[in-house]
Image (spheres, helix red, strand yellow):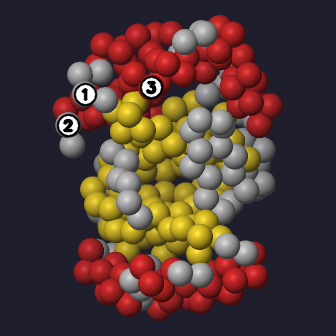
Amino acid sequence: MRLSTLVLLLSLFIYSEGNAQKHLKSFDFKKGEVLDVMLLSINENSNELYEQYKKIIFPIGFEYTYQPQLGFMTTELTLGNHLPESLVIGKWESKEKREAFLSIITKKVPDFHQRRRELWKYFGLTYYVLKEDTQFSVDTRKYNVATSFWQKSPESFNSFYSKWQKEINDFGGKIIIQLKDGTSPTGYAYNPDLFLIIEWQDKSEFEAFAKAHPLSSYEVLKNVHQFVIN
């Protein structure tokens, strides 16, 4: 992990990290709030650009109820063909506030998207409107894997997922959070039909599951993306 990435992540998390237990990253969302999942990879030598971004963009986000949450560095790509450097969670008060920010930001900052491109070489974003109160915690002492599925058809996916979920449990895994019905803004498309974070006791437990479920076992899907977070 490059130093610039570490500095950025620490800055993103500073608003909430202080209250977190050492090994536990906890999240608490109310019904109707919006949860952002952001996959990020930062450009080199971008600390100054980030400081400018933080001074210009963050206050507008705060005005529209954006609340930075904890996030994760990534360590290994296990399925798919792209490993982002980090996975960051965000919170907004409502869908209306979240989408109002998307609508107004280029009026307030015309070069907003250019600033993002200069700062991040990859920026994937999906936001989810929570349909019920949602709390979850990720224990970084465990082996945690983020997984995204894109379906070919609802029927084949439902059958696949029912079996896959049972086998997760059989191999000792635990689904921490699952999200669906997300939205990706134009230019930031990363919108799986299902996004999950799964906890394993250790790497060997996950590897036993992965050995029994190679890429060929996911052929019923349009795509799968999976990587380790901590």
Identify the amino acid type marked 2.
Answer: Arg
Q: Is residue 152 left or right of residue 212?
A: right
What is the quadrant of the C terminus in the image?
Answer: bottom left
Please say if the residues under marks 2 and 1 sit with CB atoms less than 8 Å apart.
Answer: yes
Pointer 2 residue: 2
| Front-lying residue, 171 or 122 | 122
Q: Residues within 10 Å of mark 1 (few under 14, many from 20)?
A: some
Mark 3 / mark 1, whichever is N-terminal: 1
Does dot 3 land on a helix, a strand or a loop? Answer: helix
Q: Position of residue 121 (x, y in %)?
A: 38, 34
Residue at horizontal 47 percent and vertical 38 percent from the top: 123
Residue 21 appears anywhere in the view: no
| Residue 178 locus on image (x, y percent) | 60, 64
- Frontmost of labels 2 and 3 is 3
The residue that disc 1 covers is 44
Q: Could you tell whether 91 is left or right of 31 in the image?
A: left
